[in-house]
Amino acid sequence: MADHNRPVTGYPAPPASNGYPTNTATAYPYVAPPPQNQGAYFNVSANPYYPDPYATQQRATFIRRIFAVFIGCIIIIGTIVFIMWLILRPQVPQFRIDTLTLSNFNMSSNSLISGTWDARFTVRNPNSKIVLYYDRIEAAVFYKSESISETTVPPFAQGKKNETAIRATFVSSSAYVDDRNGISSERARGTVRFNLRMMARVRFKAGSWWARRRILKIYCPDLSVGVSANNTGGSLVGGSKNCRVGL
């Protein structure tokens, strides 16, 4: 005989007809099983809302390979450049001003300067495996930071461990200088200090397989020229001086 106190765990039976149940099948307490065709639910490639993990993995692998090739190229190029530097040991040339002669120097009452500056330099190539080609050299003479005259030096080539003498001539007929009192006071003491600056476009070449272009900046400061108030000319005081060279 059935126990009426036992709790019901399944689905309720359909209502009785004429007091008798119409279906005596057992009700199961479990949810309905999934449909037989499970492709639409579990096949990721057939579902447009989920990316294909295999394709995503392929793209990630491709990107990693490209990145590895890029890093490898950088390492190889850097190694080659470092080895070449160890072999060649490139150095910037050395500039020395030997003489600086001033003639026809004059300053008017309205701060206009005229004169001729003749500078002689010695340029040395310290490299034992590199030839230097000076394609263009621009030079200027200054009083403090005020430009007085500019000129160019003819191009030339310089062999290994070679010294070359060059010349630069500056001519001014009416250059304005704001610090007229400064020149007058220096001239009263017997010397006037000028500055020379040059910019050179140089090719560093080793054989026929290596070449590099550089722009050199040459600065020759505080060049004292002996010229008094009663004279119109003078020359460099203190002998030759080395110039500063930078890239």
Image (cartoon, rainbow, N blue to C red):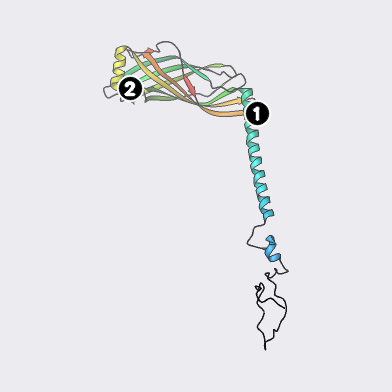
> In the image, what residue occupies the spot 65% across and 37% down?
72
Q: Which residue is mark 2?
A: 113
* Residue 134 x/y as whole percent: 54, 25
Q: Nearer the viewer, residue 148 or 6?
A: 6
In the image, taking residue 91 as reference, residue 207 lies left or right, namely right
Determine the image quadrant of residue 144: top left
> In the image, what residue occupies the spot 67% across and 47% down?
62
Callout 2 touching callout 1 (CB < 8 Å): no
In the image, taking residue 138 as reference, residue 53 lies left or right, namely right
> In the image, what residue occupies the spot 45% across and 20% down?
168
Residue that lies at the very extreme toward the bottom in this rendered image: 18
Q: What's the mark number on residue 209?
A: 1
* Residue 96 x/y as whole percent: 48, 16
Q: Amino acid at mark 2?
A: Ile
Determine the image quadrant of residue 172: top left
Q: Nearer the viewer, residue 72 or 99?
A: 72
Q: What's the mark number on residue 68?
A: none
* Residue 103 x/y as whole percent: 37, 15
Quadrant showing the N terminus: bottom right
Total numbered badges shown on the rendered structure = 2
Q: Secondary structure at mark 2?
A: strand
Q: CA distance from mark 2 to mark 1?
A: 49 Å
